[in-house]
Amino acid sequence: MVEAEDLQSLKTIALLGGCRGPIWLSSQSLGNELGISPQTASRRLIALERQQFIIRSMKPDGQYVAVTQKGGQALKREYTDYVRIFNPEQRQYVLAGTVISGLGEGRYYMSIPHYKELFGECLGFEPFPGTLNIRLDAASIEVRKHLDHAGWIDVPGFTADERTFGGARVLPCRIDGRRCAIVEPSRTHYPEDIIEVIAGCELRNVLNLNDNDTIEVEITHD
């Protein structure tokens, strides 16, 4: 959980342009923006750096500060909460986490022709034979609890070659602007911190992802 004063400082740095790249920022100037002393502002910067929300570097003309990807994720989660409060019809959610390796089950099921056909009909794209497994961070686990009524699409099960294949549900989403979907097989009880994502391409390859890389999943209903 991000402390309120740290979040306010992070938002101020972002408003000054810190999400677009390093900006010149002294403890005095940050203190002036926040209405606090330079000493308190310095402690805020140290706290943000310790939490890896910002990076700082020194140049001949002073200190430069930039918001990290982790810091941006914290701000996006705060934004998502406000969207849910003030514009509930938009229902935009952001899930953040790290890429992990799966057991290969997703690749098997996404390779079954009838499954591919069913998912294609529901989502408008033929899924790549494999899933991207993501371990959610603590804040996103809480966000996920609000997704049960967020627009899931049921994919029916079927029987083929005297074998029954279970159904699933999918939730359209986007990663880096690409159309994807969170998939949850009906026969599987998923841990609350793990999601599997399907797409029309191999996301690991296209986005150059490795295990432990951070990633965001946007559910926007667009």
Image (cartoon, rainbow, N blue to C red):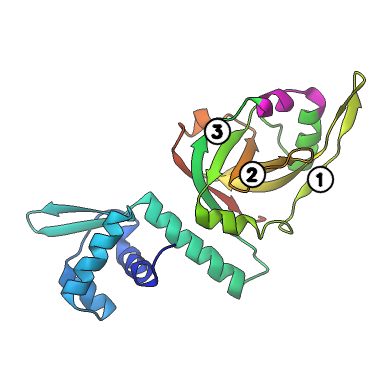
Element under disc 2: loop
Residue furthest to the top in view is: 161
Q: Which residue is more in the foreground, 210 or 136?
A: 136
Instruction: Single out the mark in the foreground, 1 or 2.
Output: 2
| Numbered circle sitting on residue 191 | 2
Q: Residue at x 70, y 41 (%)?
A: 183
37 lies left or right of 71:
left
Q: Position of residue 165 (x, y in %)?
A: 84, 29
The answer to whether the residue labelled 1 contacts the one labelled 2, judged by CB atoms less than 8 Å apart, is: no
Badge 3 amino acid: Leu
CA distance for labels 1 and 2: 20 Å
Q: In the rendered view of the protein, which quadrant contains the C terminus? A: bottom right
Is residue 140 visible in the rendered image? The answer is: yes
| Numbered circle sitting on residue 154 | 1
180 lies left or right of 113:
left
35 is higher (above) or lower (below) than 146: below
Neighbour tally class for label 3: few under 14, some 14-19, many 20 plus, Cα within 10 Å: many
Element under disc 1: strand
Magenta span has 110? yes
Q: Residue at x 93, y 20 (%)?
A: 162
190 is higher (above) or lower (below) than 51: above
Q: Which residue is more in the foreground, 189 or 101?
A: 189
Instruction: Single out the mark in the foreground, 2 or 3.
Output: 2
Q: Which residues are magenta?
A: 105-114
